[in-house]
Structures are given as C-alpha cells and as structure tokens.
Amino acid sequence: MRGHEMTPRVGVQIRPNHVTWDEMAAAWRHADEAGADSIWTFDHFFPIDGDPEGTAFECWSTLAAMASVTKRAQIGPLVTCTRFRNPDLLADMARTVDHASGGRLVLGLGSGWLERDYQSYGYAMSRDADRIREMEAAIHRIRHRLGQLRPGPVGPLPILVGGLGPRMTLDVCARLADAWNGWGTPEEIAHLNGVLDGWCERAERDPAQIERTVAVFETASDATYDDYTAAGADHLILVRSGPDYRIEELESLLAWRDSRSGS
C-alpha cells in the first residue's frame, strides 16, 4: 500500500558526529522510548555538516551498540556505502547486527558520494555510473552471502537503496530493493515516486512492494507532512545532527503520525 493509504511511519537519523558517545546513546534511547518506528545512523568517516574536523564515529560499530541500547525501533544505516566494505563481509556484519537487535535491522545501501571519505581511507572513487553498477553487483553478492551464513538473519533482511538518480539508482531499487530513501520537496518526491513506479512496471514488479522513505531535514507543519504522504511517502525520517540533536522535535512528528492513525 502507498503512503496516503496506510498509517505513516516515523523515524529519525541520529548522525554520529559533533557529540560524545553518551550523548548519542541518550538520543537513541529517547527516540526509542518516544515511539519512533526507526532509528538510523550514516556511513561517513567525517561530519558532513558543521565543523568538518569535528568528532565522528564509524557506522557499523555504532549500529552494533545501537542494537543493544534500543529495544523496539527498527535500526539501520541511512545509508552504508557498498564500496567501503567487501560485500560478503558486509552481509556478515549485517546478519550479526540483525541478531544483536532481535531482527530489527534494515540494510540501507548507497553508492557513496563524499570524495573525502574515499580519499582519506584509501578507496578509489570511480564515476557515478560505475559506482551504481558496483552497488548493484554488491546487492547480489550480499543476498547470496546472506543465504549461506549460519545462522542466517533472524528473518528476511530488508534492503533499502538510497539515492535520487532517475535512470540508474531507481532502476536498481525497482529490481532489487525492499525500500527506497529519497529527499526533496513533496513535489520532487511525487515525481521520483512516479519514476520508481515506472521502473517497477518495467521489472514486472508491484510498486507497493517497495517502501518509500523520505528524509526530512527540518520539522514542518502537519500539512507539509500530509503533502509528503500524498506524494507517496510511507515513512518520514527526521534528520538530526549533533551537538544538539533537538530530539524532542521528533515528538511533534510522532504526534502527527498518531493523529493520522487514530491512536
């Protein structure tokens, strides 16, 4: 079912930068206890907002801790770069975090875009199209490895693909992913959802099988949130960075969700 036909979901991305570990963990607990449907981190080796030399923590070590600190929300990277880790190893890491969380992991994947991440850690940064092809190949390897691991994931491990590229990224998403993450105005999201639906039709896949998640960078009015769901969003994810996460602002988005669900 598409976003405006079902109860919307609400999550928060708590970026692992410009904070102490204890401050970040407290934000996870707050979001989980407040009723967030999902809690996310990201996969950058340096802050992408504020002071570029500020503090930052690594994605998958952070997720392992998040799995233990939280109890009910889905967790995941929004997103992890498929170039930074061997895909078979990444599958094993994801399976392990899935067990640590009791089956709550969503494996968010992307092709990576920040040149500093690549250069500073010794990765070669290829052209956009090549990185997307490599992401597609990585998804196949990840799914194959997940089927070989013992034990396997707790249940079917959902794969999310993040990105806005209408010709390649959304094509890969339509064929291989369980969820998509994008960002932009409601009008832009409506357009991209239409493009994704078109790729699903070409792949002979029901578009309703792909959850549509949207990153929201600032709190907004209930009317704006309604516009996102009318544009096809199933799941709104509030983006928050340190040092002041302002995690209490998540509660207004949760109140909007609950008012739309009648709870």
Image (spheres, rainbow, N blue to C red):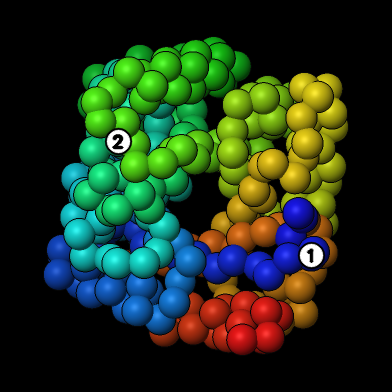
Location of residue 95 (image quadrant): top left
Res. 19 in view:
no
Q: Are circles 2 and 1 on residues that touch, CB within 8 Å?
A: no
Along the horizontal axis of the image, is 95 left or right of 228?
Answer: left
- Circle 2 packing at 10 Å, graded few (<14), some (14-19), many (20+), is many
Q: Amino acid at mark 2?
A: Arg
Labelled disc at residue 95: 2
For numbered disc 1, what is the local secondary structure?
helix
Res. 207 in view:
yes
For numbered disc 2, what is the local secondary structure?
helix
Along the horizontal axis of the image, is 184 left or right of 12?
Answer: right
Labelled disc at residue 159: none
Q: Which residue appears at 54% of the width and 19% of the height?
A: 136
**Picture coordinates of residue 231 (x, y %)?**
80, 58
**Picture coordinates of residue 183 (x, y %)?**
63, 52
Front one among 111 and 50:
111
- Circle 1 packing at 10 Å, graded few (<14), some (14-19), many (20+), is some
**Picture coordinates of residue 169 (x, y %)?**
64, 28
Q: CA distance from mark 2 to mark 1?
A: 32 Å
Q: Which residue appears at 80% of the width and 64% of the height?
A: 5
Relative to 166, does residue 14 appear above or below in the rendering? Answer: below
Location of residue 26 (image quadrant): bottom left
Along the horizontal axis of the image, is 129 left or right of 149?
Answer: right
Relative to 220, does residue 151 appear above or below in the rendering? Answer: above
N-terminal-most mark, 2 or 1:
1
Nearer the observer, disc 2 or disc 1?
Answer: 2
- The residue that mark 1 highlights is 4
Q: Which residue appears at 44% of the width and 77% of the height?
A: 35
Location of residue 58 (image quadrant): top left
Indicate the quadrant containing the N terminus: top left, top right, bottom left or bottom right.
bottom right
Q: Which residue appears at 76% of the width and 73% of the height?
A: 226
Indicate the quadrant containing the C terminus: top left, top right, bottom left or bottom right.
bottom right
